[in-house]
Image (tube, rainbow, N blue to C red):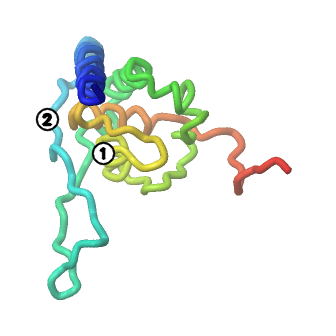
Amino acid sequence: MPAQRTQSRRSSAARWAAPALLLVLAVAGSQGATPLRAPVIAAPGVANPAHIAAGGRPPPGPVVRNPYRGEPAVARAGATLFVSMHCSDCHADAGAGAVGPNLGDGRWRYGATDAAVFRSIYFGRPRGMPAFGGVLGAQGVWVLVTYLRTLPPPPDRPTERFTRH
């Protein structure tokens, strides 16, 4: 029975994610923007500190770059994808933070580079961030990363976590 539920969830997610990505790509194309290009790399590898590197030096990894960085039409499409994928359920409207962290404050637990943010969305992270790479693919994740780069920082950034006594 649990296997059937898992399969049902996967097929349900695929049913609504594919149309959402197509909508985003159509919106980006209709804005007179440069057509979306294929990503530079499909899915960057995940560094694993448990791996042993010969000679104590890990091999150089590929350079991962956001193929849409700075493209306003793609960022607008990413805003639509952010809503349609229900990212705001955890990160609130415009990524201001709720259950999930604020996405515009420049503080990233797993790294602030485009590649690190890509990995967080594509592969997921512990403590509640699901992996969206299987649903969105690399291109959809890059569209989200492009949108996240446009989020304004909050007017007040606390320097430490606030706890009530």
User: What's the mark number on residue 16?
Assistant: none
Q: Quadrant of residue 100?
A: top right
Tell me the distance, in whole angstroms, between the alpha carbons under discs 2 and 1. Answer: 19 Å
Residue at 59% x, 33% y is 96
31 relative position to 94: left or right: left
Q: Quadrant of residue 4?
A: top left
Q: Residues within 10 Å of mark 1 (few under 14, many from 20)?
A: some
Query: Measured from the top left, where is residue 3 in percent x and y?
Result: 24, 29
Q: Residue furthest front?
A: 1
Q: Residue at x 53, y 32 (%)?
A: 91
> For the view shown, which residue lies furthest in the bottom direction?
55
Crowding at dot 2, Cα within 10 Å, few <14 / some 14-19 / many 20+, comes out as few
**Residue 134 drawn at (x, y percent):** 23, 34
First in sequence: mark 2 or mark 1? 2
Q: Which residue is mark 2?
A: 38
In-image side of 108 versus 10 (left or right): right
Residue bearing mark 1: 123
Relative image position of residue 75 (x, y in whole percent)? 37, 28
**Location of residue 162 with respect to 60 vertically, above or below:** above
Nearest the viewer among 131 and 139 is 131
Q: Amino acid at mark 1?
A: Phe
**In this orientation, which residue lies closer to the viewer: 86 or 62?**
86
